[in-house]
Image (spheres, helix red, strand yellow):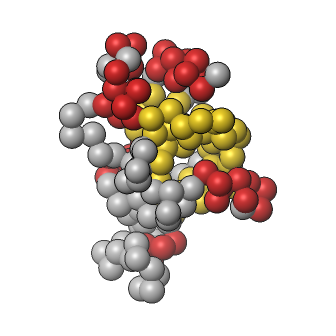
Amino acid sequence: MNYWLMKSEPDEFSIEDLKARPNQTEPWFGIRNYQARNYMRDAMQIGDKVFFYHSSCKVPGIVGIAEVVTNAYPDSTAFDPESTYFDPKSDPSNPRWLRVDIRFVEQFKEIIPLSLIKSLPQLADMYLVSKGSRLSIQPVTAEQWQAVLMLSR
């Protein structure tokens, strides 16, 4: 099993939105970064666990857990001229952009703020706190996963 952190702006799509979806499941679409796409394509597997992270908000941080429930498949928003995520260079016969579906697992009682994550030595190597880290999908080690879980309890 792999562990991930996936970022979403809560005013666009929050963990509460995920929890309210049918089957508490949603496609994670709109990824337009090649490294994030490669993580989905090459490394994400059904059953992988995901930290759901609220970004670009007053208190950014980890708010809960989701799980990957599909393998990567073409992101149809890339082919839709009406979509914000339209990519005229993406070809349905050879899709450039992918998505996975995630399912809600748990919402933490309290947010684990980025400021706290940055202050902990055991999380100093977490991709999230690396200088210049802006990827919306990031790997998390098993040790980092356990350290964050301890904070959530």
Among all residues in the image, which is located at the extreme front?
A: 58
Q: State whether residue 94 is above or below residue 139.
A: below
Residue under the image location 54 percent in, 37 percent down: 111
Looking at the picture, how far across and down is residue 10, in whole percent? Answer: 50, 57
- Please indicate whether residue 23 sits to the left or right of residue 58 in the image: right
Which one is nearer the viewer's eye here, 73 or 58?
A: 58
Residue under the image location 21 percent in, 40 percent down: 132
Q: State whether residue 2 is above or below residue 124.
A: below
Residue 105, quarter of the rendered image = top right
Residue under the image location 54 percent in, 60 percent down: 13
Residue 149, quarter of the rendered image = top right
Looking at the picture, how far across and down is residue 46, in whole percent? Answer: 64, 40
Q: State whether residue 73 is above or below residue 45.
A: below
Residue under the image location 34 percent in, 21 percent down: 119
Q: State whether residue 136 is above or below residue 106.
A: below
Which one is nearer the viewer's eye here, 113 or 104?
A: 113
Looking at the picture, how far across and down is residue 90, in whole percent? Answer: 36, 72
Looking at the picture, how far across and down is residue 109, in whole percent? Answer: 66, 35
- The tally of labels here is 0
Among all residues in the image, which is located at the extreme left?
A: 131
Taking the image as drawn, is residue 104 in sight?
A: yes
